[in-house]
Amino acid sequence: MDLSINIGGMAGQGIDTIGDLLTKVFVKTGFYIFTVKDFESRIRGGYNFTQIRVADNPVHCSVDDIDLIVALSKDAISAKRDQLVEGGIIIFDDRFDFDALEECHYPAPLSKKAREVGGSTRMTNAAALGALLSVIRFPFSLAEQVLTEIFGKKGEKIVEANVRVARSLYDLTEETFSGSCRHNLSMIDSIPSENRLIINGNQAIAYGAMAANVKWVSSYPMSPSTSAFIEIVSHANDLKIGTLQTEDELASLAMAIGASYGGVRSMVTTSGGGFSLMVEALGLAGMTETPVVIYNAQRPGPSTGLPTRTEQSDLLFTIFASQGEFPRIVLAPRDPLDAFDVVTRSFNLAERFQVPVIILGDQYLADSVMNVPRIDVTNVEIDRGKLAADRLDDPYMRYRLTDDGISPRAFPGDRGRFIVSSGNSHLEDGHITEDPAIRNAMVQKFLRKITAIKDALKPPDLYGAKTTKTVVVTWGSPWGAVREAIEHLEHEGVSIGHLHFTDIYPLRTKLLKDVFTSAERVISIEHNATSQFAKLVTMETGLKFDGYITKFDGRPMTPRWVILQLKEVGI
Amino acid sequence: MITVEALEGPQKITWCTGCGNYGILAALKKAIVELDISHEDYVLVSGIGCSGKIPHYINLNSFHTLHGRPIPVATGLHMANKDLHVLVHTGDGDCLGEGMGHFIHAARRNVDLAVFIHNNGVNALTKGQFSPAAPRGYISKTSPPPPGSPMEPVNGVAHAIVAGATFVARGYSGDQKMLVELMKAAITHRGFAVVDILQPCVTWNRKLTWRYFNERTYSLEEAGHDPTDRGLALQKAFEYNGKIPIGIFYRTEAPLLIDGLSLPDVPLKDHVTDRSRLQALIDDQIL
Ligand SMILES: Cc1ncc(C[n+]2csc(CCOP(=O)(O)OP(=O)(O)O)c2C)c(N)n1
Ligand code: SF4
């Protein structure tokens, strides 16, 4: 079973609510889901949708084909109708006149019943939920249970009214809507999945940071990063985490740097435009060797770009941002579950190497929802790196020249020593200098870290053999769509492999070189217009790709799109 | 107890002979010697400029940051460890130009910092360009000729009072006795404390000289100023031309930023998130 449901309407019509409800209903009954949201940068009106993919096997991306449309506005019918599969169902409010009705088009009295039964057209979404559950043959008892749980917080009256409205449409649909197009979900008894934790990428980022003992988060709101910050703020009181919405992004990162110098794990959350403003402070973290984690949920640029949509176009900017040269680490999670792992590692890497770590997420990762196994935070490993021994290393020098380039850290307030840090070129003791020999020694000290960083990073994942005819190279969130596309192609007998990077920079080149020598064709797929990762690979290795697949319309990739593109470049 | 000698900085001072910064450094050392605070609990955070070099001339914890950014860095540090006394040393270019937004917001947050503005009316380290605090008509290579700086100076004292700073004073490098007292009061004040320090730059500023200040400054305290009256403080802040008041303009109590955040009782630095609590929060969401 692999069913995709598209719920569309105007902002303000409760699209999100039914999306969330349905997602919960399916997960609760044991399915795997992957939900994406597509919305405009406006508060009311327009056309928005939530797309839920329900399957009895894990799914990691959204798809083009839609089995079932729920339309709460007229646009919602026309916008998605072309993607409806043969025999697919459209449920829509019978207020809209819709010509050319076919067997599986179902005009339902959604708003009418909401008013009659529930007392308010605001319950139209509950009505739609009832109709939909009936159409897919989902036992109402299960739905009722979930509805009660979810609306429970709003009080008994509201729960009851919503359940009544949903029930009325459920029953009515059972009686009036017939056709061969019903999707049978009677296998729900089998409970295929026990993954009952529903998270999106930003929540995973937040949980990961909290599990890693983040103690200070300063941020300035910017889509699509904001919900990660909100998630942490919402637990700040419970878990005693310092959080502050600052006057701008520069202040956010400067504060995080100050906090880290003071001895706490600190982080900022932002999106590309905000990261641009942070760049000055990024250099300060570099020069002062202050660990800090920067989460950049990318969106299409330049400038304000497409505020609510997705792209992976900040990669080269991230790698080169700041005047001067210093090591930094760039990581890009492939999906919400991976995001948790990436964030917990990012804090360890930042402290082990005393460098800024930038996590490159994107809107697609940030907002897509999946169900994952219970996340266990209790054994997340915490490595604070090289700390100065309690006994007084005499005299303490913050920037002691060491073989591995890493100087032991100490924190102000320690007895018997002073911690001197400077964004200017400095001596081992932290005080400024313009001495050329020291300058050289300090820069070499920085750069010595890079080899060790590469060893500490995770090598890319290779799916299939390096000797397949074609190898596709990806990084970050397109992983899901590309993976599914390639599995499909493999089934068709295509000789194709897939090399995927999560730990991006400094770039590990060994597997890349292997792949380039053994495969006939190497193709990059990225969510940007200029194949930035491919450029990075070429820059670091001299190797040139045989094909570049790019997407920069702000919309996520789907497996079918990937397959089409691959066929176009020739596989 | 710490001595002035023990505070002696590790580096040779590179300020010009006769610079007002010497008086600020001397007053700072005296204030620290006189206060009963362990010297390991101080941190000096500075920006960029002649003023920004002060951490290298005194033996304390320090963080020499970016131009205009010492206040947010200091804020983060203070959050991490509220037991520390965090002092910001900044120039008028640093604080009232590049860093103006941070200054205003830190004041309204009432972050528990002591901010010392080395106010010389010029961007000294970049060779004397007019700074935000330069008087109208100040002539430098970057002020449009012929009239010099074509705008009013930023009034740091007034801005601080309006923004919500809870301790606002003006000191003068040439009045050591008062400056030491102002610094001690600012350091021990619970909240955002600003001391705008008149600091002659003998190399660039031909107008705001030692003589200029010696002739004009007078003590607010001796004049019977009541520092609890905000309106009066603001009025005094605008008195600058003929006579220049120095001393405490305004002092009050208000909730601190840390009081409004969910911080633990121990310094944040020593707190570890209870992961079983986090696990419970996550488990709660499992359907
Ligand atoms: C981002 C940035 N812009 C400009 C500079 C150059 N710069 C160095 S010091 C300075 C002015 C300092 O003036 P002020 O804060 O008044 O300190 P003073 O030197 O007068 O003590 C400037 C503009 C810099 N270092 N960084
Ligand atoms: S240039 Fe001016 S402020 Fe800088 S050290 Fe010389 S006198 Fe002092």
Image (cartoon, coloured by chain):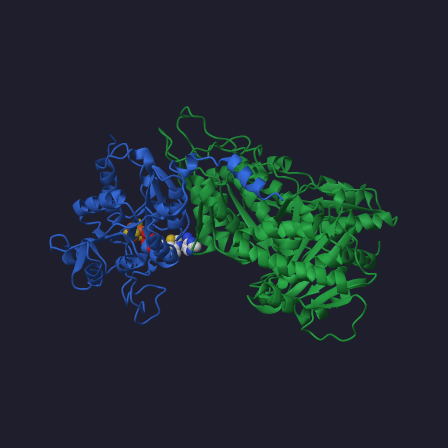
Chain colours: A green, B blue
Pick out the residue farthest to the right. Answer: A493
**Residue A68 shows up from this direction:** no
Q: Quadrant of residue A30?
A: top right
Residue A70 percent location from the top left of the image:
70, 63
Quadrant containing the C terminus of chain B is top right
Residue A478 percent location from the top left of the image:
70, 52
Q: How many marks?
A: 0
Relative to the observer, which residue lies in front, A59 or A148? A148
Relative to the observer, which residue lies in front, A113 or B41? A113
Against A518, residue A478 (above or below) is: below
Residue A435 percent location from the top left of the image:
44, 40
Q: Quadrant of residue A381?
A: top right
Say which residue appears at 34% left-offset and 55% top-offset.
B108
Say which residue appears at 25% left-offset and 38% top-offset.
B32
**Residue A476 shows up from this direction:** yes
Quadrant containing the N terminus of chain B is top left
- Apparent side of residue A475 relative to residue A567 in the rendered image (left or right): left
Say which residue appears at 72% left-offset and 65% top-offset.
A91
Relative to the observer, which residue lies in front, B142 or A251? A251
- Apparent side of residue B135 relative to residue A299 in the rendered image (left or right): left
Residue A207 percent location from the top left of the image:
56, 43
Q: Quadrant of residue A342?
A: top right
Say which residue appears at 22% left-offset and 63% top-offset.
B238
Against A208, residue A306 (above or below) is: below
